[in-house]
Amino acid sequence: MTVTAVASTTHEEIYRVEARAHGLVGFIALHSTQLGPAAGGLRMRPYASEADALEDVKRLSEGMTYKNAAAGLALGGGKAVIMGDPASQKTPELLRAMARAIQGLKGRYYTAEDMGMSPADMAILAQETPYVAGLAEGEFASGDPSPITARGIFNAIRTTQAHKSGSKDLTGLTISVQGLGHVGWYLCELLSEAGASLIVTDVNQAQVAKATQAFGAKAVAPDAIYGVEADIFAPCAIGGILNAQTIPQLKVAVVCGGANNQLASPEDAVALHDADILYAPDFVANGGGIINVATEIERITNRSAYVAEKLRALDLTLKTILAQAKVEDQSPDAVAISTVLAKMARQNAA
Ligand code: NAD
């Protein structure tokens, strides 16, 4: 296995990892360790090129710096990616080689599941390094973060709605949900229990059929979700879906969901603000997942109290960001980023 440093002016450390014998090419990026060891998941995707994989790991690790800081965690931002199709190219040897590269960072980076990874894969990584979270078993195992992620998004939806309309009550509101996977499904359960009517979509038709049954949801085609009339849009599938093509179609007052990197570019936050659509920054709204993972990294014994406390604080952070954005007539995304940068600067000065 070879681990080669990649020069960067934006990230503290980036490494290219290669183990030819096991078909491994990947990257590990540590954007910032200012607030603590860098933490963020390991993603496996059939990237078209190494340049694409490198770009993804840089963007995602920077996002983790903001997410971890917003969630009030003593963790920095990091991420790792492996090039390849997880369905056909993921082998225990490949995972173990990546784990040895993570071990080589001696705890400056903690990994967990991301796209293409499962708790079983984390157990394989853990054979080579202790710097792994998201395990299904063990004293501090945190398991599937999705229910906590969904709970955090649900709180964020209520807070954002209250900021917009004066009431947290979701009874009778219409909420469109894109993506009915782990997070989207748990979120639909919470929204449905809270009395909201759901309009849903997914590229997986079986999930859509299940949601129409379980929640009495109305289903629309994947591309039609942007144009539906609703009070709130909750993106819970993929990134980049808030862009110059989709924003003009939106007929909602609030966008608040769990997908990472919903904005195609920072200008899209401004476009939403100009359209009077209140956008809850994704890295704040979906912080529940990393809070759950942090219980494992920090070896927290009273998990539920810790999670409840951090979720409460996260909700307060969002409320403060929305209030400041209103006063400054700025997009909440810009305010959220400046809030976490200021927090890091204070930490630096201390
Ligand atoms: P998942 O893979 O379980 O679910 C994603 C769902 O989106 C799938 O059902 C998929 O079929 C659907 N989908 C994909 N492309 C679509 C499209 N174009 N239109 C409609 N549906 C589409 O993933 P997840 O764990 O539920 O995560 C969802 C999002 O939330 C991702 O962006 C993820 O990065 C983010 N996120 C997840 C967690 C977590 O705890 N799982 C935490 C933070 C952020």
Image (spheres, rainbow, N blue to C red):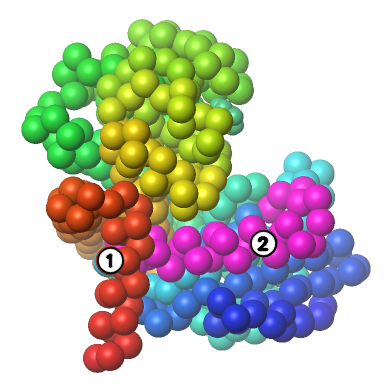
Relative to 259, does residue 62 appear above or below in the rendering?
A: below
Query: The residue tagged with tag 2: helix, strand or loop?
Result: helix
**The one of 31 and 216 positioned closer to us in this rendering:** 31
Magenta stretch: includes residue 149: no
Which residue occupies the extreme left position in the image?
166
Between disc 2 and disc 1, whose residue precedes?
A: 2
Q: CA distance from mark 2 to mark 1?
A: 25 Å
Q: Residue 282 appears at what percent x and percent y?
A: 39, 48
- Kindly identify the residue that appears in the image at 51 percent across and 29 percent down: 246
Q: Is residue 268 left or right of residue 12?
A: left
Total count of labels:
2
Which residues lie in the magenta part?
44-71
Ligand 1 closer than 8 Å to the CB at disc 2?
no
Residue on which the image places disc 1: 339
Depth order, front residue of 129/45: 45
Furthest residue toward bottom:
350
**Would you name the residue on which mark 2 appears?**
55
What kind of residue is marked 1?
Thr
**Residue at the image point whose x is 38% and y is 31% from the top:** 234
Q: Position of residue 66 (x, y in %)?
A: 39, 64
